[in-house]
Amino acid sequence: VLQSLAHTPLMQGLVLGCNHTHSKDQEHACIACELLGTISAMFSPPKSLPSRVLGAIAPHRLLCTTWRRCPHIAGHDQRDAHEFLIALLQAFSHDLQKEGDVVGSTERKRPRQEVTPVELIFSGELCSTLTCGHCGRESKKS
């Protein structure tokens, strides 16, 4: 999941380019801070980070922070990667919305109905086209 997120160009740009600042006195665990730290570490030279061993990264802080924010996926039970991805993206999007952090944005408060950057990157619409094998007529649904 983390490699997929880190190597999605738009997500990489969002995480590494956001104006996120997190006050240490805030009560909730900040997914945006941990995601920024983890993805930054993935693209940093190995010698610059003493916690890295032979280029390996152990994202335990991100995992624990995600568990604190999303208790329904906490623990060592078997979980679906998609379930983790959705929880992580929702918490990250919430942190960015709460802080007003958007790449290139100077606004601190954003309207709730506005589409978030995470939604712009990962949302989609299912469309189906059925073609009759007999007459060739197409039926499209979105």
Image: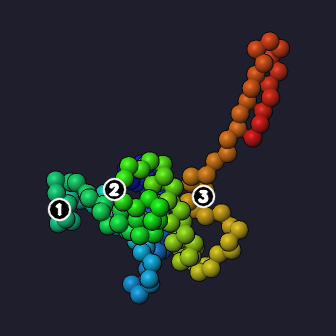
The secondary structure type at the circle numbered 3 is helix
Q: Where is mark 1, residue-wise?
A: 47
Quick one: label 3 or label 2, which is nearer the N terminus?
2
Residue carrying label 2: 76
The amino acid on which the numbered mark 3 sits, given as a three-letter code, is: Glu
Q: Residue furthest bottom?
A: 25
Image location of residue 104, percent across then percent down: 55, 70
Of callouts 3 and 1, the N-terminal one: 1
At a point 40% along the width and 65% down the height, the residue shown is 67
- Residue type at mark 1: give it: Lys
Amino acid type indicated by mark 2: His
Q: Which mark is residue 119?
A: 3
Marks 3 and 1, how far apart at CA: 35 Å
In what element is the residue under mark 1? helix
Q: Going 53% across and 62% down the picture, which residue do you hit?
A: 90
For residue 75, what is the image quadrant? bottom left
Check the image and report above or below for 134 versus 124.
above
Judging from the image, the colouring scheme is rainbow
Q: Kindly tell me whether residue 9 is visible in this rendering.
A: no
Q: Quadrant of the C terminus?
A: top right
Q: Are marks 3 and 2 in contact (CB under 8 Å)?
A: no
Q: CA distance from mark 3 to mark 2?
A: 29 Å
For marks 1 and 2, give the one nearer the viewer: 2
Mark 1–mark 2 CB contact (< 8 Å): no
Say which quarter of the image contains residue 45. bottom left
Along the horizontal axis of the image, is 17 left or right of 47?
right
Of 55 and 128, the residue lying toward us? 128
At label 2, counting other C-alpha atoms closer than 10 Å, the crowd grade (few under 14, some 14-19, many 20 or more) is few
Residue 30 point in image, percent of width and height: 43, 73
**Image quadrant assignment for residue 23:** bottom left
Image height of 129 relative to 102, above or below = above
- Front tag of 3 and 1: 3
